[in-house]
Amino acid sequence: MAKALDYASLSLMDALDLAILVEEEAQERYEEFAHQLTTHHTLEAAKFFLLMEQNEALHRVILGTRRKKLFGTLPRNVTREMLWDVEAPEYDGARAFMSLRQALEVVMAAESKAYEFYDTNLKHITDPEVRTLFEELREEEGEHQAAVRAEMEKLPPGPDPDPEDYADEPNAM
């Protein structure tokens, strides 16, 4: 059984490791979604999920560089088993034939979830350096939400395609 995180006693190193793992989990989920939607020839949504995968990878590298500068190669105390779907979109978020708007809605939900995670756990954190890091991460998630909203506003109005438009007719036996 995985050890639960005690946010009140997180060290800065543990908080950085947690943030890196959050980005890693989201990166992997977006990569899965991009692959799934490419397979279904839903390229606009797949391209956006690929962009998100690259963004999460960049955030992970930035956090990893910061961690290495401060703590070198000290081993992690925080593992993936200690978190689940902090920023990663829900597994059932990607659908075959989803529109770009639907993909943006999935990303918005994930960014909102991450914002709430950092905001909620700030209440338990007493270490000033960890508080500052969580405040920075919460602010970044808010900025990501604003960027997604801006992308949504660029989309033309109108209904999204109905997935049933892509369904195959039943085969006669």
Image (cartoon, rainbow, N blue to C red):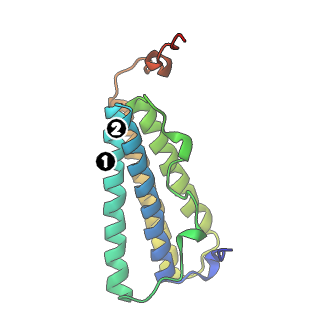
154 up-or-down from 22: above or below: above
Q: Is 45 in front, or is 153? A: 45
Residue type for callout 2: Thr
Which quarter of the picture shows residue 10? bottom right
Whichever of labels 2 and 1 marks the residue nearer the N terminus, that label is 2
Evaluate if marks 2 and 1 touch, with contact meaning CB atoms under 8 Å apart: no
**Res. 132 in view:** no
105 up-or-down from 118: above or below: above
Distance CA(mark 2)–CA(mark 1): 13 Å
- At 49% from the left and 13% from the top, the residue drawn is 169
Q: Is 90 in front, or is 169? A: 169
**Res. 36 in view:** yes
The answer to whether 128 appears left or right of 124 in the picture is left
- At 45% from the left and 56% from the top, the residue drawn is 26
Q: Position of residue 94 (x, y in %)?
A: 48, 39
- At 42% from the left and 89% from the top, the residue drawn is 74
The residue labelled by disc 2 is 38
The residue labelled by disc 1 is 51
Q: Position of residue 70 (x, y in %)?
A: 36, 86
Quadrant where the image shows the N terminus? bottom right
Q: Which mark is residue 138?
A: none
The answer to whether 166 appears left or right of 55 in the picture is right
- Residue at disc 2, secondary structure: helix
- Residue at disc 1, secondary structure: helix
Residue type for callout 1: Leu
